[in-house]
Image (cartoon, rainbow, N blue to C red):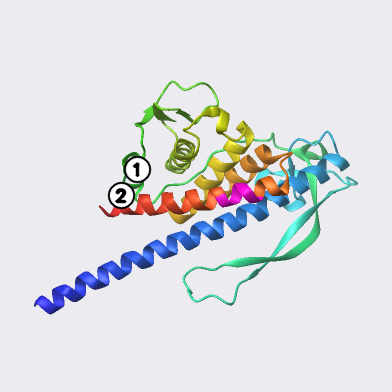
Amino acid sequence: MATTKSTKRHTSKAERQQARERAQERAQAALDRLGEGVRYSLGNTILIAMQMPTATHVASFRSWKRDFNRYVRKGERGIEILVPMLVKDRDEEEQDEERRRLVGFRVGHVFDVSQTDGEPLPTLVDEVAGGVERYAAVMEAVRAVSAYPVELVADLPEGTKGYFRRGELIAIREGMGEGQTVKTALHELAHSRLHDGDPEGMPDRAMREVQAESVAYAVSAALGLDTSGYSFGYVASWAVGKTDEEMRACLQVVRDAAKAMVEDLQAAMAA
């Protein structure tokens, strides 16, 4: 009996270690995708602006019809963008997760809403949709590893999903979906860990937002939550004007912060 019990403990420890390693791999893969996605988003934003400075909402010919029940008018000329070409990574040991790698870009075309007719465009809400596995445990872990209270607040200013008040608390808008709540909590937790010192020694506001959202994106991926639809655009908008050297330095900060946060959250959830 004693031998069986000992073996069971050893297996459980090994499984926990495997889970930690898989989570860190998911976080790193997410950061790689984020870097590719941000470069792609910024480049295409510039391409679109050069070809049609008045463009507001763009989508492909098929997407306008399928997703919005709108139709591109005959004779309209498409706006050229770069579309990433992804192939399945065959050199992978784990078969339960399909991974893809970037092999290049091809020219694609999108159309502005002004080039289409059909049903009114729905209100676009930049929120992370869907539920979160073990949502209550994740939020409890965030509270456990935070140096400050994490509070759900009902009366945040319009458009504010959360904030970190230096030296005091993390506030999250009450009533959001599970995915957006977790993503926002991780974003503000990243701020509290990276940006809680002397303001004069901090990076500028734009870089602070890039760092916090990048960490939130990577940690969300480690937890099984895909926030790319929100995070890519968010990071791209704040990264405008940053040099390659600044972004490389930022990436190292993000990697270290994301790795530490994943480890702390997993330990809190296992306790």
Residue type marked 1: Val
**Mark 1 lies on residue:** 145
Residue drawn at x 39%, y 28% as measured from the top left: 169
Q: Residue 268 carries which label?
A: 2
Residue 9: quadrant of the picture: bottom left
> Label 1: few (<14), some or many (≥20) within 10 Å?
some
User: How packed is label 2: few (under 14 Cα within 10 Å), some, or many (20 or more)?
Assistant: some
Of 239 and 51, the residue lying toward us: 239
Residue 249 belongs to the span the image colors magenta: yes
Q: Residue type at mark 2?
A: Ala
Q: Where is residue 254 in the image (x, y as percent from the top left)?
A: 54, 48
Q: Residue furthest left?
A: 1
Residue 255 in the image: state x and y as whole percent: 53, 53
Regarding mark 2 in the picture, which secondary structure is present there?
Answer: helix
Q: Is 234 positioned to the left or the right of 19 in the image?
A: right
The foreground one among 202 and 39 is 202
Kindly report the distance in space between the C-alpha atoms of the residues bearing marks 1 and 2.
7 Å
- Badges 1 and 2: C-beta atoms under 8 Å apart? yes
Write the start and end of the magenta stretch as one range: 248-252
Our reading of the magenta stretch's main secondary structure is helix
Q: Which mark is residue 193?
A: none
Q: Which callout, 1 or 2, points at the residue further toward the start of the chain?
A: 1
